[in-house]
């Protein structure tokens, strides 16, 4: 109940500490869960992995199935953290049932583009608000994420990965594809901004 002087009775509503959209939370949780099954499979799911030579030999399923395979617990957990970090704001941006489809489609297409970029680079080998790309926060996040992937891939510092090579180049290609695709997708599918009509008084704005 709102008194006439604009103040509210009772304590203010409590904000949730952990507020990740369900689709992003499910995606992040699926990665260690899938690796748990992968680790126990007698083939280690190697038949789902991607090798650059697959492109030359006309095998393309690995562009997508490789997204289900991880090089170790550290790799699976790193990807899960990335999914929660970058997926949560995107899931909020693409709200509603259609937004869930757009979110998952962007994830799958970005993953396929990442694997394709890795394959082309190693051709013939065996193994809320959309910010502009020039925004300082976007640039810093991109540099940090690419740096982490480069360190892990080049130095091999991946505790628990048991020597498995992580295709950091694929992460880089996927990140670049996704960040370039967000703007066009947001112009079509993002939820409209919530607007308020602020009255001249001192009370809270009325939706």
Image: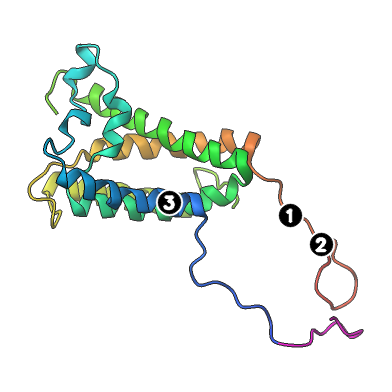
Query: Which residue does the image show at 39% across and 37% down from the upper left?
Result: 176
Earlier residue among tags 3 and 1: 3
Q: Is 192 drawn above or below residue 20 in the view shown?
A: above
Q: Is residue 125 visible?
A: yes
Q: CA distance from mark 1 to mark 2?
A: 8 Å
Q: Is residue 159 left or right of residue 185?
A: left
Q: Is 21 drawn above or below residue 113 in the view shown?
A: below
Residue designated by label 3: 26
Nearer the observer, 124 or 69: 69
Q: Is residue 198 left or right of residue 15?
A: right
Query: Which residue does the image show at 18% across and 35% down from the upper left?
Result: 45
Point out the stretch of residues depicted in magenta: 1-10
* Within-10-Å neighbours for mark 3: few <14, some 14–19, many 20+: some
User: In the displayed image of the protein, which residue is found farthest to the top?
Assistant: 57
Query: Which residue does the image show at 38% across and 48% down from the upper left?
Result: 142
Q: Is 140 drawn above or below residue 98 in the view shown?
A: below
x, y (%) of residue 22? 50, 54
């Amino acid at each position: 109940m709102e008194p006439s002087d604009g103040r509210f009775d009772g304590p203010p509503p409590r904000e949730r500490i952990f507020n990740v959209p369900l689709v992003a939370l499910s995606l992040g949780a699926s990665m260690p869960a899938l690796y748990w099954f992968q680790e126990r499979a007698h083939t280690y799911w190697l038949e789902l992995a991607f090798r650059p030579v697959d492109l030359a030999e006309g095998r393309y399923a690995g562009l997508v199935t490789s997204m289900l395979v991880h090089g170790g617990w550290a790799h699976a957990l790193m990807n899960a953290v990335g999914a929660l970090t970058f997926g949560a704001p995107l899931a909020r941006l693409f709200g509603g049932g259609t937004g869930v489809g757009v979110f998952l489609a962007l994830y799958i297409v970005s993953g396929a583009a990442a694997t394709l970029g890795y394959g082309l680079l190693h051709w013939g080998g065996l193994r809320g608000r959309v910010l502009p790309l020039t925004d300082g926060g976007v640039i810093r996040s991109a540099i940090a994420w690419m740096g982490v992937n480069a360190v892990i891939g080049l130095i091999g510092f991946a505790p628990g990965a048991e020597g498995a090579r992580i295709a950091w180049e694929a992460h880089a290609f996927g990140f670049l594809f996704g960040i370039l695709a967000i703007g066009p997708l947001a112009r079509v599918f993002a939820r409209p901004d919530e607007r308020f009509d602020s009255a001249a008084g001192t009370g809270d704005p009325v939706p």
